[in-house]
Amino acid sequence: MTSSTATVPAPEALPKVKTDLLPLLLLPAIALAALPLTGSFSTWVTLTFAGLAMGMIIFIIASGLTLVFGLMDVLNFGHGLFITLGAYIATSVIGRMSGYVESPSLVRNLMAVVPAMLIAMLVVGAVGFVFERVIIRPVYGQPLKQIMITMGGMIVGVELVKVIWGAQSIPLPLPAAISGSLLFGDAAVEKYRIIATVVGLLVFAVMLWVLSRTKVGLLIRAGVQDREMVESLGYRIGLLFFGVFIAGAALAGLGGVMWGMYQQTITPEMGGAINVLLFIVIIIGGLGSVGGCFIGALLVGLVANYTGFLAPKVALFSNILLMVLVLLWRPQGLYPVVKR
Amino acid sequence: MSEPLLNLQGVHTRIGAYHILHGVDLQVAKGEMTVLLGRNGAGKTTTLRTIMGLWPTAEGSISFQGESIASRPTPEISRRGIAYVPENMGIFSDLTVCENMLLAATGAKRAEDLDAARLEWIFGLFPALRKFWQYPAGLLSGGQKQMLAVARAIVEPRKLLLVDEPSKGLAPAIIQNMITAFRELKQTETTILLVEQNFNFARQLGDQVAVMDGGRVVHAGSMAALAEDEALQQHLLGLSLASHQ
C-alpha cells in the first residue's frame, strides 16, 4: 500500500464539542427552588435524599427498559413483572436468613441482603430469558401486539406470583444495621436511602463504563442509533438485544429488591404500579438514552418527594406534569438518541 | 470473463406489495470495479440491499465465491468479506471516528488493536480522519462522513465492497478526493460494486458497467465502450458524457 496524495480541505479550527449541560442543571435548579418552599433546611435535606434514593432505584429498574426500546423499538409493558418477582424472591431468601437480618452487625446483614439481590437478579434474568423467547420474539416489529402481549404476560406472571407467595402483602423489613436514620445537624436521613443512592450511582458508573469502554457497549450504542448498519458490519443485533433484555430484566430484579426494601412492604401489584413511572422516566430522558434515563429518574424522584410534602394533591399528577413540561421544552426528551 | 466473484441470476425483490427487482442478472469480476448506473427508482440501491440480505430475495440466485448467499442473514453475508457503504452512509453520529472504525474491525476490541499500517494507509487516503479521530462523527461535514463511511468499509481487507452513491451531495473538490481514494483502492485489487448517478464520476473509475432500468439490468459491458459511445449513453441514460461535463 502506498500513501496517496489525496488531500481533504479541512476547516481552520477543530469544531468545538458542545456538552449539553442544561438537563443536568435542572436537578440542582429544582432542588434549590424547593429549598425556600420547604421552610426548613433539615426538611429539605431529608426530602432531597428521599428523592435521590427513589430516583436511583427507578433508574436501576428503567435503564434496561430504555435500552430495550432503543435497540429494537420493543415496548415491554411487562417490565413490572421483573420488579415484583425480584422483591418476592428477596423475601424468600431473606426470610430464611432471619438471624443474619436481625443481627446488629452490618456485615451479617449484608450476608443476607447481598445474596438476596444476586439470587433475585439471577432468577429474574432467567425469567427475562424465557419472556423474550416466548412472548416478545414472535411480535418483533409489531408495536400494538407488543403492548398487548407484554401486558398479558405481566398479568399471567403476577397471578403466578400470587399462586406461589399468596395475594396478600408481605413485609420486607430493613435489616437492623441499615434501618434507622443518620443525623446531619437537624436533618435526619434514613441510612437505607444513602445506601440506595450509592448503589444507584455504582450501577450508573458501571453502565457508563460498559457503554463507553467496551466493544459490547459500543455495539449497544451503535445499535440504538442504526441497527441495520450494525448488522451490515457483521454483528447479530438480535443476540445483542437478547443479552441487553436479560441484563435489563436482572437489573429490574435488583431494583425490585431495593424498591421492596424502600417501601418495606411488597404486593403482587407493586411492579404494575411503578410501570407508568418507568415509562415517564424513559420518555423524559429520551427513548434509548441511558444518561437521559438517569437524569429523568432523579427528576421524577425529587419532584415526587417535594410535591408530596408541599402539595400532596399535586403529587398525584406531578410526574405527568413534569413529563408534559419537559416534552414541551424538548419534544424528543432530555438527551434524544439520533436514530435513522 | 472468468468465474465472477459475485453472480446474480434472475433476482426478484419484493418489498411489501411492491415488486422492485424484476430478474436482475449481474456479474462482478474479481479485482474490478463494476459500476451500476441508472435513473432514480431503477432498482440500484435495492440490488445492493438484496445482496446484503437487508431485503429478502424473492426469486433467483445470488452467489458469492460460488456459494449461495441469497436471503442469508446480513451479519453472515458481511462476515464472508462483503462490506457495505449505504447511501445514507450509516455513520454512528454519537460515536467518535475512532469508535466507528473500531466497530468495523471485527478482530479489534480497542483502538490499539487496529492494524497500524493499514490505518496509516487510510489516513493517507483520508487525512481528515486523523484530525478528527477522537471527535463525535456527528460533527463531521457531509464529505468527511462519506470518507469515514468508506474508510470504515476498508479498515480490514474485504473481498467485495458495495458502495452506494459516494458522490451524492458532495462538493466537486471532495468528489475529486473521493475519486483519488477509489483509484488508490483499485490498485489494491479490491473488488468494488459501485452504485452511481454521477456518470462523470463513474466513468473515471469503472472497469465494467451495468445499466439498470425498471428493476432489470438492460445493458452490461465495459465502461470504456460506454464512455466512447454517446448514442448508447443517450439511449441508456438519457444523457451524453459531453453534455454532462
Image (tube, coloured by chain):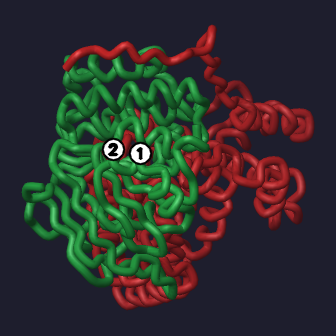
User: In the rendered image of this protein, does residue B100 appear above or below residue A333?
Assistant: above
Residue ranking furthest to the top:
A12
Q: Colour of chain A?
A: red
Q: Are marks 2 and 1 on the same chain?
A: yes
Q: Position of residue B185 (x, y in %)?
A: 28, 31
User: In the rendered image of this protein, does residue B111 appear above or below residue A329?
Assistant: above
Instruction: Identify residue type, mark 2.
Output: Ala
Q: Position of residue B139 (x, y in %)?
A: 59, 29
Q: Position of residue A60 (x, y in %)?
A: 49, 52
Label placed on residue B227: 1
| Chain at numbered mark 2 | B
Residue placed most toward the observer, A188 or B104: B104
Quadrant including the N terminus of chain B: bottom left
User: Residue sitting at 31 percent across and 23 percent down?
Assistant: B122
Q: Is residue A289 left or right of residue A235?
A: right
Q: Which residue is mark 2?
A: B224
| Chain at numbered mark 1 | B
Residue placed most toward the observer, A145 or A237: A237
Q: Colour of chain B?
A: green
Locate residue A32: give its quadrant. top right
Q: Helix or strand or loop: what does disc 1 sit on?
A: helix
Asked whether the viewer can see residue B193, the reply is no
Marks 2 and 1 close (CB-CB < 8 Å): yes
